[in-house]
Amino acid sequence: MEKVIFPTWSVQPQAEAIVKRYFRQALESCPEAAAFQQTILEQCGVRLRDLLDHLVIPASQTSARELHNYGWQLDAHGLLRNTSGFFPTITQGGATVKVYFKVEFMADFVRALGITHPIYGKPFAPHRQVCVWKNEDVEFWAVQRNGTQAFEVDDPSDSYIQASRIHQQIFRSRRRQFDHDEEGFDHTDALVQSAVGDIGRDVACDLFLRAEREYWMSRNYAGRVQKMRQDKFGLGWANQDHHTYDSSRELFYRNIRVLETLGFECRERFYAGADAGWGSQILEQPVLGSIIFTDIDLAPEELAGDFAHNPLEPLPYLRRAGLWTALHGESMLQAGLNHLECMFDQRVLRQQFQSLGIDMMVPFSNFKHLYQELTVGEWWPVNPKTVDALEAKGLITQQQAEDFRVNGAIGSHFENLERNDGYKGFNQPGIDDVLRVLDPRKNLLEVPNALN
């Protein structure tokens, strides 16, 4: 059967040139912003370009026709959006260029930079913003979005904000360990549906992902280190690119159900090939712009069906995603995210991590437009009873079972990712190669049916 591959995402250097033109002019007109850009690059590997939320450009400096020619289309609110790549929204108006960049928590950002300008938007409101630097030629603003695409501050009621804070704490403290994983998904479904009913799917989704990242950080050293470095400047995870979940075949559709309740839409899927034996459904939340990879073991003939929504029977073998889940649990429950991917200047971050004693694996995408590499995985202990059951079923060898009992198995990672020229896609062959290497079994040739 023919492989299902990613849609054709293309590099768009001309559209990127437009963004860079106005961004460069703005930096040249504001030494403070230029210094901030250099500081966050040198101290935490983050590029300010990757944090751009939107630009306000005087109509006299560019035409809607020019922007349309390079991919920006007017939406129902009169905003120019370019969804064919990784680009900021553009609006036209005013006499000066305004640059808006994202931060995760406004209060942390203002405190970190010592900003005294007023913050527009209540604490915990869906939209907050603050003017950071301003002169007669340009303005730089920081914006915090908690599940909204709005460009104007419109504070919700105090009762709404209180409900949001309550649901944030519920997500942060939600139970993840259950005797049966089906019960865990029932519990998670109920929490998500309650939040969506009270505060809307987009804000609920933002709060849910924030709690997921916090849980992942509790089990990933590299993530904790990098978050601390970015928090020094009040950025939080504003440079996030996508989250990755692993799932068992039997409960994969339950993962998708949770994510779709939160507003995620199935964007694309692919199959890494019969030898690799795994596939992914990629989802995107259109309001947040957040992307999620959900990985499972797949047989070739299953591509013809809707594997994202129909329950799948167990296979007589385990590949990478299936074994990771069998050893550690469901990503949506006890195991947490397999990895979080954020955008950086990849060379700078790699050098900084090396100086901190954090080792990286061989990159699995190494192009001008896309670079991806993972940290060497955290090793997690595995319950011996879990290993015994897998060995008894013939899903792992005796030697592998003993290794898991003594040494544990690869758990989570952190990903160093760089995008250029607006490229929004991923590298399927590279992902295939690296995730086969990340199979918890050290030698695939010893795996029953692994390459058959």
Image (cartoon, helix red, strand yellow):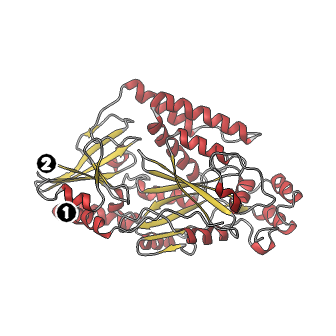
Callout 1 crowding tier (Cα within 10 Å): few <14, some 14–19, many ≥20: few
Quarter of image, res 126: top left
Q: Which disc number belongs to residue 94?
A: 2
Q: Does residue 111 sit above or below 413 in this rendering?
A: above
Q: Residue furthest right?
A: 392
Instruction: Tell me the mark number nearer the camera, choosing from 2 and 1.
Output: 2
Q: Position of residue 241 (x, y in %)?
A: 46, 57
Which quarter shows the C terminus? bottom right
- Say left or right for 95 vs 118: left
Callout 2 crowding tier (Cα within 10 Å): few <14, some 14–19, many ≥20: few
Q: Secondary structure at mark 1?
A: helix
Which quarter shows the N terminus? bottom right
Amino acid marked by disc 1: Pro
Q: Position of residue 110 (x, y in %)?
A: 31, 47
Amino acid marked by disc 2: Gly
Q: Residue at x 49, y 62 (%)?
A: 7
- Say left or right for 368 vs 183: left
Whether residue 360 can be seen here: no
Whether residue 91 can be seen here: yes
Q: Residue at x 15, y 48 (%)?
A: 93
- Say left or right for 304 vs 227: right
Would you name the residue on which mark 1 appears? 31
Q: Does residue 394 sit above or below 442 in this rendering?
A: above
Q: Which disc number belongs to residue 322?
A: none
